[in-house]
Image (cartoon, grey):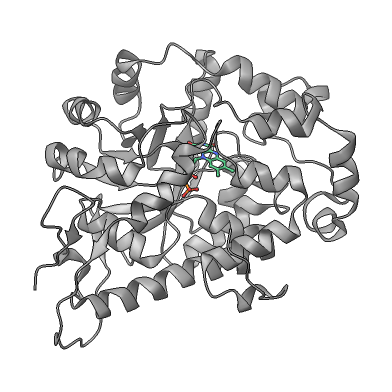
Amino acid sequence: MRRYHSGPDFRRAHSIAELAQMAHRRLPHFAWEYLEGGAEEELTLARNRQAFADINLLPHTLVPCHGTETRRTMFNHEWPLPMAIGPTGYNGMLYHDADIHLARAATERGLPFTLSTVSTSSLEQIVAAVPEVNLWFQLYCMSDPQVQDDLLQRANAVGCQTLLLTSDAVLLGNREWDKRNFARPRQLSLRNKFDVLCHPRWIRQAVWPQGMPSMANLDRYLPADQRNAAGAAHFIGAQMEKTLDWDYLARLRDRWPQRLLLKGVLHPADAEKAVALGLDGIVVSNHGGRQLDGVPASIDCLPAIAAVAKGKLAILLDSGIRRGTDILKACALGADAVLLGRATLYGVAVAGQAGAAHALDLLTNELHLALTLLGQPDMSRLTATAANTHSPLFTVS
Ligand SMILES: Cc1cc2nc3c(=O)[nH]c(=O)nc-3n(C[C@H](O)[C@H](O)[C@H](O)COP(=O)(O)O)c2cc1C
């Protein structure tokens, strides 16, 4: 990672990379690795960034710009920007009530916020704290149908209209840092315990005095004495349904009449199946490089997916979005919008809601600037001439 010298004030971070640097300094080692790490050799994690770097932008010159247009219509709703905060679990380890801070930052900007199944604030807590939130819920397929059904009922009861089923994490990816940092499950190694003591600011902002957060959505399914991080981790490990298949998704389609998206699509044939099942959208995603190492960057999979699915359902993309130009490239190659993972997590880890808001504003400002400099101020008119992402990216004038 490039070194920046922006000090501790998050407002002095001029890019997501600088926010990441601040988060790195702020968090104890084990929490930083949880946020930043990928699976095994981290090949996919690295590709996610390299693939965006490999896409060239070819601007038109002498195009007068009287303002930029980033609005997008998706799901019969007009969004101010083609982005939403995606689902990330266990955010409360980065900052107390991080899910609520993220939800507030997104809501203030008219953007959706996605709550993970394994979040540290529950569906009910989010809606109580941020009543205006456009709440999306990410579902892991649970082996206990009663738990699954109850989660769906609760999502419905709090007014959640959009459900994302994550399909690329039926087993947890091989994250070696996790094994290194813990002596036993949920028991930090001595070295990491010492490192925690060297981060008093994080102790204050994340775990003092309330302790490590539990997975709040799951608390009610656990015996009272196991409603903590260790109990929830054990529970979710046992619950993750490894036999998840297309029949399950078809049943979920019948069970959940509101918007249903499949998260974790990389193969165009799977995108076609999602269209055939009548899904409302897909998320082209490799889980931020945290699951199967060696899969392509999701942006490299996008053109082939857009070729078979564009206009038939909403196409969202995540994995590696760190710049406004990344959003622009994703939309030009066929995405309707992007989901943000680590980008907003860096912000929330540094300064809660204000940090998350800063991350969103950095990306927004970069996007507006890039549209102007590209000579195509209207996002909806962005297209790429070639499906090959290593070719220059052209815009229509
Ligand atoms: C710390 C962390 C936790 C995550 N937890 C979840 C989760 O609970 N459910 C899920 O579907 N995806 C989860 N993801 C994956 C994100 O939704 C998203 O696919 C990924 O972060 C995108 O990559 P990026 O962070 O490099 O942009 C997580 C990612 C991170 C970094």
Q: Is residue 257 left or right of residue 105?
A: left
x, y percent for residue 113? 47, 52
- Between 114 and 255, which is closer to the camera in this rendering? 114
Total numbered badges shown on the rendered structure: 0
x, y percent for residue 237? 62, 19
Looking at the figure, which quarter contains the N terminus? bottom right
Q: Quadrant of residue 55?
A: bottom left
Q: Residue at x 88, y 41 (%)?
A: 193
Q: Is residue 152 left or right of residue 371?
A: right
Q: Is residue 25 left or right of residue 330?
A: right
x, y percent for residue 385? 10, 57
x, y percent for residue 189? 85, 33
Q: Is residue 38 visible?
A: yes
| Vertical position of residue 304 compared to residue 324: above or below | above
Q: Is residue 103 visible?
A: no
| Vertical position of residue 240 compared to residue 260: above or below | above
Q: Residue at x 35, y 71 (%)?
A: 367
Q: Residue at x 25, y 32 (%)?
A: 279
| Vertical position of residue 251 compared to residue 196: above or below | above
- Between 232 and 159, which is closer to the camera in this rendering? 232
- Between 377 and 143, which is closer to the camera in this rendering? 377
Looking at the figure, which quarter contains the C terminus? bottom left
Q: Quadrant of residue 227?
A: top right
